[in-house]
Image (spheres, grey):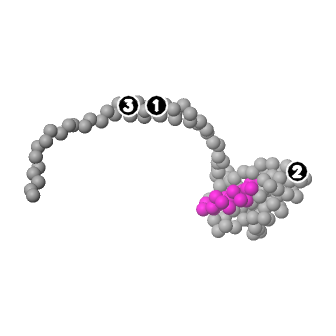
Amino acid sequence: MKFRRGREDKEEVEINISSLIDLVFILLIFFLVSTAFVSESGFEASPSSGLSNREIHLDDGPIRFKLTSGEEIFYENQLISIAGVQDIVRPRCLKKEQPVFFQVYKGVRSGLLVSAMDEAILAGASSVKIESLN
């Protein structure tokens, strides 16, 4: 049995995409109208202006911590743990509302900074600020 390829009258199939284009434009308009544009504000780390690399500690001045790229937190040149941030901030903030400054060296993990900031806020810090050190 031999099969031949014969020429048969084949109908051309045409796809009408005009309704598909209309649907795409309707969906585009729907998503543009229903989208909420939110501008979220973050925090900015500005370089310290004229501050030396040593910390200045005054009882009624701001509380300053240094965070190094080696996952270390220093307060008055003494190494402390994350839990130590609350132990230092709480008694000083009970006397008077004081801001807490985190002096951050280049290469510090953001998780360490956020954890330290959370500890300061939980201890009652009135404001938490970040200073960038090189």
* Mark 1 or 3, closer to the camera: 3
Query: Position of 134 compared to 129: left or right?
Result: left
For the residue carrying disc 3, how many other residues have a C-alpha within 10 Å: few (<14), some (14-19), or many (20+)? few
Residue 128 magenta-highlighted: no
Residue 77, visible in the rendered structure = no
* Mark 2 or 1, closer to the camera: 1
Residue 105 picture location, percent across and down: 64, 60
Q: Secondary structure at mark 3?
A: helix
Badge 2 or badge 3: first in the primary sequence: 3
Instruction: Identify the mark at residue 19; answer none if there is no mark.
Output: 3
Q: Is residue 128 above or below residue 54?
A: above
* Amino acid type at image mark 3: Ser
For the residue carrying disc 1, how many other residues have a C-alpha within 10 Å: few (<14), some (14-19), or many (20+)? few
* Mark 2 or 3, closer to the camera: 3
Name the residue rendered at 85%, 57% in the picture: 90
Residue 82, visible in the rendered structure = yes
Instruction: Identify the mark at residue 96; answer none if there is no mark.
Output: 2
Per the rendered image, the range of residues in magenta is 100-118
* Amino acid type at image mark 1: Ile
Residue 24 picture location, percent across and down: 42, 34
Residue 89 picture location, percent across and down: 82, 58
Q: Which residue is mark 1?
A: 26
User: Which residue occupies the extreme front position in the image?
Assistant: 1
Query: Position of 10 compared to 123: left or right?
Result: left
